[in-house]
Image (tube, rainbow, N blue to C red):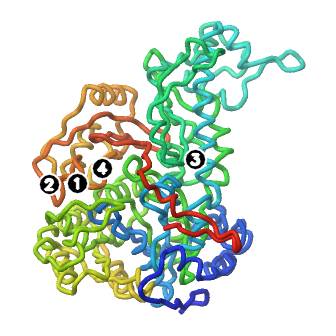
Amino acid sequence: MGKTTRKLEVVSPVPADIDIANSVEPLHISEIAQELNLSSQHYDLYGKYKAKVLLSVLDEVGGSEDGYYVVVGGITPTPLGEGKSTTTVGLCQALGAFLDKKVVTCVRQPSQGPTFGIKGGAAGGGYSQVIPMDEFNLHLTGDIHAITAANNLLAAAIDTRIFHESTQSDKALFNRLCPPNKEGKRKFCDIMFRRLKKLGIDKTAPEDLTPEESSKFARLDIDPASVTWRRVMDVNDRFLRKITIGQGPEEKGMVRETAFDISVASEIMAVLALTTSLADMRERLGKMVVGNSKAGDPVTADDLGVGGALTVLMKDAINPTLMQTLEGTPVLVHAGPFANIAHGNSSIVADKIALKLVGPGGFVVTEAGFGSDIGTEKFMNIKCRYSGLKPQCAIIVATVRALKMHGGGPQVTAGKPLDKAYVTENLGLVEAGCVNLARHISNTKAYGVNVVVAVNAFSTDTEAELNAVKNAALAAGAFDSVICTHHAHGGKGAVDLGIAVQKACENAKQSLKFLYPLDIGIKDKIEAIAKSYGADGVEYSEEAEKQIEMYTKQGFTNLPICMAKTQYSFSHDAGKKGAPSGFILPIRDVRASIGAGFIYPLVGTMSTMPGLPTRPCFYEIDIDTSTGKVIGLS
């Protein structure tokens, strides 16, 4: 075992996740950093068990060779989840604590929406978790709060600008935007030169502008009906899905309909996940399009003068957070973009730092949100395009439970007991459901990577059922298929998976094939993805057609596509299980995250603000007032 790894004392039956997490005293985070050869100048401590790794580390290790890059996706899940995060952590514990490999786990920061809502936290589970689990699932180092603050500052800037432009002449606007200093001289502040450049004005002094130029500069003329930027908060609150603003007496006549999104659905979160440096983040934040002028021109955060301020709010959030697993292997937690709306992957900068720190022969294992039709597809076609990184291996996590559902089993509902079909042997359902696994394997193999299937075993699964999944995976073209018990046994239960992943990486091809080129039309790209789902074609609403036409006219056609789709089916209909085909995929709307760098079509009905169930997770969450420890997190 490595110097910092820890031997777990496992018990059966497996206790609650929070009880396991609380039973292990984490190592001081400086010990984890030392194992990665990080000196104290490369990180800032956030208490005893967390640290922010500074991007400056890349200046020192940037020239060294990368380790192996592994992405973890899954089959189409049940609403209970199939243990993708648990498998990611368990594999890393196996590689680091049992196979003596340098390894870093790269995962997303969870939103407080699911933590207090229906799914619970995302630290893994059982004996394969990130710790301290309560800190991981709650505030962590404040990155999501920074995103919330930055997002809402931009929202305030938009409405304030509309308000002031509605009550002032062009001349008054210009004079207030460029007020005279004590000597009576006017000057442009730095950010204003970005707008001047966009307008093709190369003058540097306000007094040199013609009346026409000063009017173009000062009046953004935002069409309130075109504003796409929404306020956010990091809880599930269905009553904010549609609201009106501007009802105060000072804003008379300025009422407009809008909505809140959950913070992790903010474009700023997607920017954080896809950025490659502080300078790149500054450019991306400034380029975010918030709406259009009445003439149809895109209006950006830099047009509003707020791009720099947004970057200041995000300057610490750009640094990944170093944590550890239950067995003392290192974890980088960074970003948490909504998986069905945005691209559902942790950050590029965390992966890049990790690949250099583990070095040749080491492993970086990163998780992609939901099934591979969503998370892995976006990992390949969006994240890898911007990072330039190429994975050697893709894991697909499968469970007997989910495959029985895809084989025609009864409905699985969160919060309700499982039907007996899921806890007693039924080979027929398992074998029928393997069509879902087979499609995920063929889709993922098409990227030119070796696919390893991790069969996440539950105590109610029989040997015959587990072997049926393993055999179906190999028949469908998987490089290997392994039964895992990491939830019950920690890294020891994923040693075979670690060996299979190592072999897959050592035998990897060097090329990465994308699903579509960037230089084709928006519709062509959407249709390429729809085809991978099994669709025969795509149907666009009138609104979607208008948006595609506008984005094409505005010059945004060369961006990748980020489909906003249900995670519970290859299709748009969550009720269609297995591997549906021959359907027409309906595109309800098409939106753009220009700063993040993608166009996102909304498939069917997708909500960007989840709601709370009748009995949310928060019923269980409390604090032991004698010890100060959190209880009830799952």
In this rendering, which labeled residue sits more in front, label 3 or label 2? 2
- Nearest the camera: 494 or 509? 494
Q: Is residue 293 above or below residue 593?
A: above
Q: Of the numbered discs in the image, which one, if any, rests on residue 580? A: 2
Would you identify the image quadrant in which residue 61 lies?
Answer: bottom right
**Does dot 1 land on a helix, a strand or a loop?**
loop
**Does dot 2 land on a helix, a strand or a loop?**
loop
| Residue 630 x/y as whole percent | 61, 68
At label 3, counting other C-alpha atoms closer than 10 Å, the crowd grade (few under 14, some 14-19, many 20 or more) is many
Q: Mark 2 belongs to which amino acid? A: Pro
| Residue 375 x/y as whole percent | 35, 58
- Nearest the camera: 53 or 192? 53
Q: Mark 4 belongs to which amino acid? A: Thr
Q: Of the numbered discs in the image, which one, if any, rests on residue 281? A: 3
Q: Mark 1 belongs to which amino acid? A: Phe
| Residue 132 x/y as whole percent | 60, 72
